[in-house]
Structure formats: C-alpha cells, structure tokens
Amino acid sequence: MSNVSTVPSRAGVALASVILYGGLRVYWQLGHMPERLSPVGPDLLVFDGWAAVGLCGAAVAVLGAMVALPRAGRGRWALAGLAWVVGGALVVAGALLLLDVVGFIVPGMGIPVYPLGAVSKAACVGSGVLVWWTARAYRPARPKALAHTPRWAFAGAYVAVGGCLARILAQAAVGFGGGDWLFEAGFLLAGTVLPLALVHRWGRVWPRWVPVLAGRAVPRRLVLWPGAAVAGGLIAYFGVGLGQMVAERLSGQVPFAQSGLPEGFYWVAVPGYVLWGAGMTVAALAYAWRTRPPAGFAVYR
C-alpha cells in the first residue's frame, strides 16, 4: 500500500522549495539576472529563462494535485508518473551542478565555481528530488523487496564499469596530461568499486578482511546515496550533452570544435559517461530494493 498519509507533509516541503526557487527565477527574469552564474554561461540546461519559471509552475501544479487528490484510484499512477517527469526535468535543468561539485572538491581541476550559480543549481536539483520524494509516497504501491540481486542488476553494474573504461580509453588515446590525483582516484572508485558494490555481497556486508566491521551490515546510505548521486549527475549532465552533440552534428556543426581535441574523443567519452550513468541507475535501483527494510520506510540504518 502507498504511504498516502505522508503526502501532504512531503508536498509542503517540496512546494516551499519550488515556490521560493520559482520566485527567484521570476525576479532574475525581470531584469535582475546576475552577470555570471556558471563557467559555461547560463546556470541551467534545457529549461532556462522563463522556461525555468514554467517548470517551477508545473511542479507546483502537480504537487497541489497530489494533495488535493489523495485517493485518485488508477489516476494515481498517472499523477505519480507526471511528478517523476517534472522532478526529473528539474534535476536535468540543474545538471551543471556537477561541474560545481567537481570544482569545489578538486580545486586543482581549474573549474571556476560561482557560488550564487552553484546555490541556484543546487536549489533546482533539490526541488526536483523533493518532488520525487513526494511522488514516492503518493504512488499506489511499493515494489516488493528483492530476495536476491537479479541478473539485470549485475548487467547494469558491469555496463557502468564498461562506460567508465571507455572514458578512460578515450583519454588514453589523446593523452592524460597532468591531471589531479585526487580526482583520478575518485573517478576510478566511482566507475569500478561503486557500481560493483551495488550488486555484490560485499556492498551489503563488510568482507572478512575489513578490521572490526567484518560480517556487519554495510550502512545502506553509504553505498546507495553515492550510487544514486553519481548516476543522476552523469545521466543529467552527459545525457543533455550527448543530445546537444547529436543536434549539432545533424545541423552540420562539429561538436566541441574549440576544445582542441579530436571529435572522435567526445563520441567515445560522452556516450561512455551516459552508459556509466545508465548502468549505475539500474544497479542502484536493484540495491535499493534488495536492501529495503521489511518494515517499510526506515532506510537509514
């Protein structure tokens, strides 16, 4: 059964976030837009300008509908699905947050961080996640916990590893340069250890060679949250990037013509990132179902 009783409280939090952010976008559109919010120009992707305001309005409408129609019968599937779409659009719009995160964590990469722009993108992505959080309680039924990790989850995890390796091979073909060791280490962990932890037993129970913790349950959020974050960031940012590359090619332009790197590099690296994110999404979904506590919604063990 769905947890309908929590919908109003969750929707209230989500509405507050969306309304405040939508109000900020309106204020900026009325002639108060900061000069610079992102190292690549606008702070949002796909939904920028008044489109971002419209997206916030759509979120307000769908959240209000979920509160007004707590028991919409079969219509709950459609409304919950619409909420997931709107929430996803907000997450995609704020996908450039990935650059801010990398630039903040690894300053040696040379990616400039614009604090106001970073806050704006975080608010956009956060609003989308809150819409999803509300839709999760509104849906008619929750999937049952998995008794074992299915084959499709293993396939997703290894597709993610393959996407990461494709990106590494593309870089090897053009040269690695200086790089930042901290970023490279995190890159490898996120592309190999993390997706595999989502499907193998050692991602749920500490292996015997780990001192003190051996045999104990791995905290669910320690694996699931980074897995979901990496998957979402890769899909949102590089999914949009791949779409733009295809559109440019179809119009006769050369993607990333000013970068100094061969076009072929991007046709390997960007799809590699997308496959990495897609595989991680599948593996993270299976991990969430596999590790779900039998009592319901308590997930922070």
Image: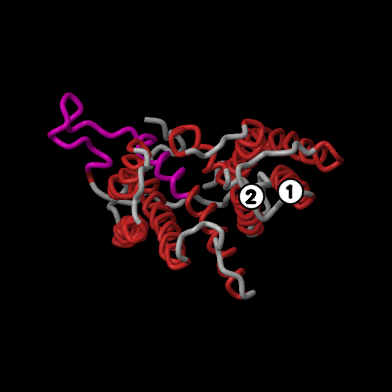
At a point 54% along the width and 53% down the height, the residue shown is 236
Residue 193, placed above or below residue 278:
above
Residue 147, placed above or below residue 124:
below
Front-most of residues 219 and 241: 241
At a point 55% along the width and 63% down the height, the residue shown is 257
Q: In this figure, which colouring scheme has been used for the structure? A: secondary structure
Name the residue at the right extreme. Answer: 30
Check if residue 221 falls in the magenta segment. Answer: yes
Which mark is first along the chain, 2 or 1? 1
Let me know if residue 225 appears in the view.
yes
Q: Amino acid at mark 1?
A: Ala
Front-most of residues 287 and 233: 233
Disc 1 vs disc 2: Cβ atoms closer than 8 Å?
yes
Identify the magenta region.
202-231
Query: Badge 1 is on which residue?
Result: 52
Q: Amino acid at mark 2?
A: Ala
